[in-house]
Amino acid sequence: MSNTGWATGAPLTTTPDWVDELLLAGDDRDVCLHFGSPVDRAALRHAVADRENTLRRLGLARGGAIALRLPPSLAYAANLLAAWRIGAQVALLDHRLTAFETDRALDRLQPQVVVSFTGTLPGGLRAFYDVTDVAQARDGHPAATGHAVIQLSSGSTGPSKVIARTAEQLVAEIDRYTRMDGVPLPGERVVLLASVVHVLGLVGGLLYCLHAGVELVLPERLTVDAILRAVAAGDAPTTLLGVPFHTELLASNPNPPKLPQLKRMTTGGELVRAEVAQRFTDRYGIVLGNMYGMTEVGVIATDLFGEHRPSLMPAPGITVRESGGELLIATPESPYVGLSDPTRWVDGWLHTKDAGRVDPATGLMTVLGRLDSQVSVGGLKVDLTEVEHTLAALPGVESAVVVYDGGIEAYAVVPDAAAAATLEGELAVRLAPYKRPRVLHIVEQLPRTATGKLVRDHAVLRTADAKPAT
């Protein structure tokens, strides 16, 4: 049954008080967040009001601009909601950025207030932190546009873009979630593995859960044991929300405990490889759902019951079409601020740069990979995604990336030297000669973006300390 319009059954509307009405409303005693310890509605509202007072004292007002450089934490959530309550535009900066990257982003965005944290963050794959946040005024400018949030794209295939969304667009995406079958329902729990700085964790995790009355739990660490402990800590039906990397991590556990409350795992981003999906469902006995989205739009299409893999159904209110083998999304205005590629948004259509098809009979869409994964080798068309998936499925390969730079090159993480030595022979059995990598690099690890996507930028991959396989 569809979870349509959790509060009223009607589409959500945006008012100046949208934060209070859609995100902070509810019984004082209801636990809404769990950052190591439970946070009820009353405590969250108190934390938001405290940060709001601080930001106003620094001169932040409606139409102002603020940047948050905070790790996942109660401080992050409270400052974000406080700034939106004021009516300011919030730029989200990943806390893992270096000082150089942060300064470059601030020079580009010119916010009036920056909220960061004191001290050094502990290591150990933590999913959330207990930090002391510090807000400082700077010589910046009010917001140049009426957008509520500014995000920098992950840059998995090139330089980052400045992407902006209005409060109305955020509310519309929350509404899309409430109208999709298979999303967590009021009274249930979400164990969030994706970052709350990026769109899946921000809207699909934090904002949707606050609106829908779903308890949002961040595990202590992003390890198999810590994630499963977070699931086991509550009795309510629980959904895991993450990216394919997290599915691969959990699927590596050969004997997971019985978790009757674990209802589903949903992944966003790239499609989970078929063999990983099968291993995960065999070991956990739950549904592995898939979600396709972009920072520019949010959730675009889903297959939350795993019924149509690898295809998905467009989310409510989303129009998708195929043009020249590319997927296009109907968007009334450009999501980009400042300099951007003028071919990305044209006449009300966002060009995803993803290859795909749309079935006219069913409406199902299938993502076939990045358009730049289609290359010509000796006049023959090669899909690098096919080569990459074939390599990644070989015994001993933990992860792989395939790129084209005058020829097909592959980078793979293969801890077992004996398995690495057999890769070229195994590929020869599975791929035609023109599809095989010209060079195969064995590396200790592959670079990933902050959202967990494998980086496919040639320059970045060359720094992975690669050495040709023997």
Image: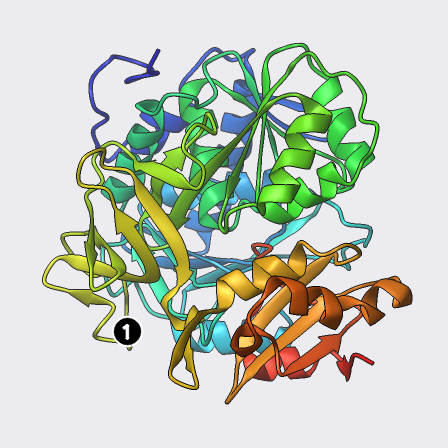
Instruction: Give the residue at x 51% y 78%.
Output: 104
Q: Secondary structure at mark 1?
A: loop
Give x and y (percent) for residue 326: 27, 61
Residue 103 appears in view: no
Give x and y (percent) for residue 136: 54, 61
Q: Is residue 307 above or below residue 469?
A: above
Nearer the observer, 163 or 365: 365
Give x and y (percent) for residue 74: 61, 37
Badge 1: residue crowd in 10 Å (few <14, some 14–19, many ≥20): few
State the residue position of label 1. 338
Instruction: Give the residue at x 44% y 23%.
Output: 183
Instruction: Give the residue at x 26% y 36%.
Output: 172
Render colour scheme:
rainbow
Instruction: Give the residue at x 43% y 14%.
Output: 26
Residue type marked 1? Gly
Q: Is residue 119 left or right of residue 457?
A: right
Q: Is residue 350 above or below residue 313?
A: below
